[in-house]
Image: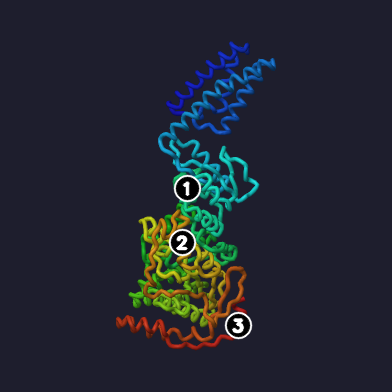
């Protein structure tokens, strides 16, 4: 207890002693009533609580102390009743007046925002408690709403539950609310969007609150909106990939992750580390990204990975590294992924994404890597841009090697990853933070979306269960219009598109398609052991013979002929192979 609090406690003890002694003298009670009352008050901790912020619990504790004191010191029922009333009226009354005076002073220092809170559970309870203890509260909760209709008419810390979430527009108008706070941190994305949409009808500012744990540990306070969870933007439940299969294939092995400092590589490293590999090695060109990835893992208590700064385009160095490290399992995530930028750098995109993949594949085969997983993209399906074309060629290289050598080398193909570095969501958040406008390329544009943990889990699953030449695809539901995702993001941050946050349509950028696809028409889809993951067997029209095509494009790249590189990647010569359908079915199953 600090000195100021000690002084306040001493003043209350002195006042209580005077009141108790006076009541004893006037009503004929026992002379030791005062010391008993003060001792019980001290033991209950009430002298450590500021009466300006007394709530129901402190009031109940105070009543219990007064009652216990009277029972202990008086056997006469009439005298006991008089003493109890005296203690409650005099000592309790002084505290009530102090609490009221503090409330009036806080109100005079600035009228708090009249706020309707959606949610009447644990999070709302913490917020109300924080407001009661705040010297100058910025918000005044005028009513609560909850999904459970049985709570209607009840009270939470003296605030009434006035209805359910369907009543938000009516109650906001009736209570003259100036703001709506959503205190349901456990709500999933679909439920959160439903609540936000209802709140939009009020034309009142809408904010979401931090989780209870954030409030309790002090990492967030009431005026903050909680960090919008990426899962809030996913229009389906995130898929959960069981790590049991991965544990048997990765545990005790030497695992190498290329692109280990990227968003996918970092999350992949975290998930692999939990499967107890013998060695975990992160390889990448950016030393800062690798260092940051390792630091995150160390701070989380995960095993510290080894770091290798290297470029997958350097064939000799990659071969030397494989000769020294002898990885059993390789996850190849290193790639240039930015579509418009790669349109302006086709040679760089080819060398990094295609030749880099071939270098890693060749070294893996030469030095006995058991499993290899290529991280690909839906942009590799009927590619309309340089980046997608390079990833398609990388897919074909992987499938070719897997079939020729009968190795468990496979491809993982998925759509856009929410919140990865340089992706859509961080860009939109930065635009909102600067006051807008939020820029949308085309209101018709759609994409498949998944979270970083989903992507990494899919990669681990594929790496552990891969059959030679298979392509593994996560069921990502229906494609989502980018404009809808942007609107969701703005509303979850408390903005109304084109009302409180301007929106500008800029038109598609170079290389961007309006719609992406996950599979080719000729690729048959088959179920796997995981209900959300399917295997696609490549058609019999591509794969073997891809090597000479890559050699021809490499020669054009060496000659500096960027336009010819672009043209040949987007329209490569046909490569015909033969894969018996029965074998394809057995592999995929």
Residue 370 screen position, x and y as percent: 52, 72
- Numbered disc in front, either 2 or 3: 2
Q: Secondary structure at mark 3?
A: helix
Position of 552 compared to 444: left or right? left
Between residue 174 and residue 447, name the one nearer to us.
174
Quickly name the residue at label 3. 583
Q: Earlier in the sequence, mark 2 or mark 3?
A: 2
Q: Is residue 512 visible?
A: yes
Q: CA distance from mark 3 to mark 1?
A: 62 Å
State the mark number for residue 487.
2
- Numbered disc in front, either 3 or 1: 1
- Numbered disc in front, either 2 or 1: 1
Task: Give me the residue at 43% from left, 84% from top.
Answer: 547
Q: CA distance from mark 2 to mark 3?
A: 46 Å
Q: Quadrant of the C terminus?
A: bottom right
Q: Earlier in the sequence, mark 2 or mark 1?
A: 1
Residue 434 screen position, x and y as percent: 35, 56
**Other residues around mark 3 within 10 Å, as few (<14) / some (14–19) / many (≥20):** few
Task: Give me the residue at 43% from left, 62% from top.
Answer: 425
User: Is 498 situated above or below 95?
Assistant: below
Task: Give me the residue at 49% from left, 85% from top.
Answer: 544
Position of 379 compared to 69: left or right? left
- Applied colour scheme: rainbow
Quickly name the residue at label 1. 179
């Amino acid at each position: 207890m600090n000195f100021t609090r000690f002084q306040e406690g001493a003043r209350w003890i002195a006042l209580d002693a005077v009141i108790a002694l006076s009541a004893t003298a006037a009503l004929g009670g026992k002379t030791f009533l005062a010391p008993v009352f003060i001792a019980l008050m001290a033991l209950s901790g009430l002298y450590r609580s500021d009466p300006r912020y007394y709530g129901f619990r402190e009031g109940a504790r105070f009543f219990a102390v007064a009652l216990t004191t009277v029972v202990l010191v008086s056997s006469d029922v009439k005298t006991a009743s008089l003493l109890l009333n005296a203690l409650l009226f005099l000592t309790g009354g002084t505290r009530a007046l102090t609490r009221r005076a503090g409330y009036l002073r806080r109100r005079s220092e600035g009228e708090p925002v009249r706020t309707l809170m959606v949610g009447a559970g644990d999070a709302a309870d913490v917020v109300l408690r924080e407001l009661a203890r705040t010297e100058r509260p910025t918000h005044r909760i005028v009513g609560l709403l909850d999904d459970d209709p049985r709570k209607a008419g009840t009270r939470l810390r003296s605030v009434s539950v006035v209805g359910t979430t369907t009543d938000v527009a009516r109650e906001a108008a009736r209570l003259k609310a100036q703001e709506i706070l959503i205190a349901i941190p456990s709500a999933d994305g679909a439920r959160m969007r439903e609540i936000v949409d209802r709140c939009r009808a009020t034309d009142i500012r809408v904010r979401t609150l931090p989780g209870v744990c954030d409030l309790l540990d002090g990492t967030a306070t009431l005026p903050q909106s909680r960090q919008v969870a990426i899962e809030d933007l996913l229009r389906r439940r995130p898929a959960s990939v069981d790590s049991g299969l991965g544990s048997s294939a990765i545990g005790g092995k030497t695992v190498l992750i290329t692109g280990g400092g990227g968003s996918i590589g970092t999350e992949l490293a975290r998930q692999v580390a939990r499967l107890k590999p013998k060695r975990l090695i992160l390889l990448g060109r950016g030393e800062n990204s690798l260092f940051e990835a390792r630091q995150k893992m160390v701070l989380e208590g995960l095993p510290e990975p080894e770091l290798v700064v290297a470029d997958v385009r350097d064939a000799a160095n990659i071969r030397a590294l494989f000769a020294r490290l002898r990885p059993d399992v390789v996850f190849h995530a290193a790639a240039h992924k930015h579509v418009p930028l790669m349109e302006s750098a086709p040679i760089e995109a080819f060398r990094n994404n295609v030749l880099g993949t071939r270098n890693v594949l060749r070294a893996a085969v030469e030095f006995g890597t058991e499993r290899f997983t290529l991280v690909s993209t839906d942009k590799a399906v009927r590619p309309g841009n340089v980046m997608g074309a390079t990833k398609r060629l990388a897919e074909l290289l992987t499938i070719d090697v897997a079939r020729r050598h009968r190795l468990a080398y496979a491809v993982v193909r998925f759509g856009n990853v929410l919140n990865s570095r340089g992706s859509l969501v961080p860009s939109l958040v930065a635009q909102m933070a600067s006051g807008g406008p939020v820029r949308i390329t085309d209101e018709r544009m759609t994409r498949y979306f998944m979270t970083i943990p989903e992507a990494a889990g899919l990669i681990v699953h594929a790496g552990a269960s891969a059959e030679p030449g298979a392509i593994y695809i996560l069921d990502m539901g229906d494609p989502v219009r980018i404009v809808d995702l942007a609107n969701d993001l703005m509303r979850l941050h408390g903005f109304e598109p084109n009302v409180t946050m301007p929106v500008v349509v800029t038109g598609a950028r170079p290389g961007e398609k309006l719609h992406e696809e996950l599979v080719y028409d000729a690729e048959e889809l088959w179920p796997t052991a995981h209900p959300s993951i399917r295997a696609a067997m490549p058609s019999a029209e591509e794969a073997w013979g891809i090597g000479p095509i890559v050699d021809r494009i490499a020669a054009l790249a060496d000659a500096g002929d960027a336009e010819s590189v672009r043209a040949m990647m987007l329209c490569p010569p046909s490569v015909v192979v033969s894969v018996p359908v029965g074998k394809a079915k057995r592999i995929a199953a």
